[in-house]
Image (cartoon, helix red, strand yellow):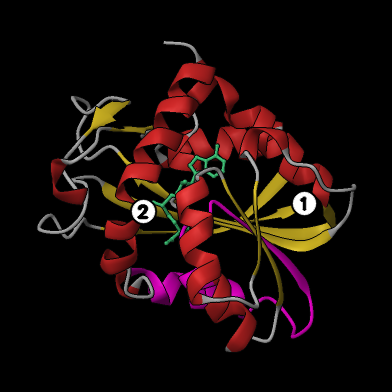
């Protein structure tokens, strides 16, 4: 399947499960320590782009708790609609990560919590290069990713979460791969983190966290 078809399927799937996603996210409690470690690099009033912001919980938290100036984007109309209902002050708009429409050097940081996981491998470096372009010099980037727990697990469509209502395309990325991609797009990795999946509520893959800086 080509990238366009994969991304179009991801968009349709999130439109279907948007309300369910809203009930499922509780401020990313398992991942908080990694998110907080990243946000500690930033200063109040800095400009942050949240890519694949979903229903907006983390964007809202970055704005209200960390006092960052947040711009959020998402591919799914339904996710954006729900984010706007709950957080009317949030600056969120429909936009595809593969086609960022911001002037160069607009942001101090880019934040991507489990959104790059939906981008097929052939597009990852292209997306990272766009992120590089919209970041200021020495700007920061953060990713939460799904990592294969065994060699048997491959990229593909998985339905385990969201009550098996939809199949979502997941690109499984290990640490060597993300380092290679970031290097190609001219980022320097600052740190990585790892945790196991909470298999009752999450996809059965390890979670990989990466913070990097524009060179
Ligand atoms: C697992 S959810 C995470 C949402 C949010 N970051 C959070 O942590 O709650 C992934 C989100 O990425 C969005 N997404 C997937 N592919 C995208 C793309 N190509 N461009 C923009 N958003 C995308 C989906 O619509 C969905 O809202």
**Is 2 in the magenta?**
no
Where residue 203 sits: x, y (%)?
22, 47
Q: CA distance from mark 1 to mark 2?
A: 32 Å
Where residue 127 sits: x, y (%)?
66, 34
Query: Toward which corner of the image does residue 65 lie, by quadrant?
Result: bottom right
Mark 2: C-beta under 8 Å from nearest atom of ligand 1: yes
Judge from the rendering whether residue 53 lies leftward or rightward of residue 110; answer left or right.
left
Location of residue 88 with respect to 150 vertically, above or below: below
Q: Nearer the viewer, residue 201 or 86?
A: 86
Where residue 2 sits: x, y (%)?
48, 12
- Residue matched to label 2: 18
**Is 45 in the magenta?**
yes
Question: Would you call the spot at circle 1 few (<14 residues within 10 Å), some (14-19), or many (20 or more)?
Answer: many
Q: Secondary structure at mark 1?
A: strand
Q: Is residue 105 something one can see in this rendering?
A: yes
- Residue matched to label 1: 214
Question: Would you call the spot at circle 2 few (<14 residues within 10 Å), some (14-19), or many (20 or more)?
Answer: many
The residue at the point 27 percent across, 27 percent down is 157
Where residue 42 sits: x, y (%)?
70, 77
* Residue extent of the magenta highlight: 31-58
Image quarter hosting the N terminus: top left
Location of residue 69 with respect to 91 vertically, above or below: below
């Amino acid at each position: 399947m080509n990238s366009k078809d994969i991304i179009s399927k991801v968009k349709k799937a999130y439109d279907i499960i948007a309300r369910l996603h809203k009930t499922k996210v509780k401020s990313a409690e398992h991942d908080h320590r990694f998110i907080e470690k990243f946000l500690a690099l930033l200063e109040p009033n800095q400009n942050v782009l949240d890519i694949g912001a979903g229903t907006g919980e983390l964007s809202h938290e970055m704005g209200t708790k960390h006092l960052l100036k947040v711009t959020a984007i998402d591919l799914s109309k339904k996710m954006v609609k729900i984010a706007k209902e709950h957080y009317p002050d949030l600056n969120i708009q429909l936009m595809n990560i593969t086609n960022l429409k911001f002037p160069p050097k607009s942001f101090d940081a880019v934040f991507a919590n489990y959104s790059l996981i939906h981008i097929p491998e052939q597009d990852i470096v292209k997306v990272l290069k766009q992120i590089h372009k919209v970041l200021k010099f020495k700007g920061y980037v953060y990713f939460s990713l799904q990592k294969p727990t065994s060699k048997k697990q491959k990229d593909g469509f998985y339905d385990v979460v969201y009550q098996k209502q939809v199949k979502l395309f997941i690109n499984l990325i290990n640490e060597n791969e993300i380092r290679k991609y970031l290097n190609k797009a001219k980022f320097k990795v600052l740190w990585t983190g790892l945790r196991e999946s909470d298999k009752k509520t999450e996809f059965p893959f390890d979670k990989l966290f990466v913070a990097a800086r524009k060179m």
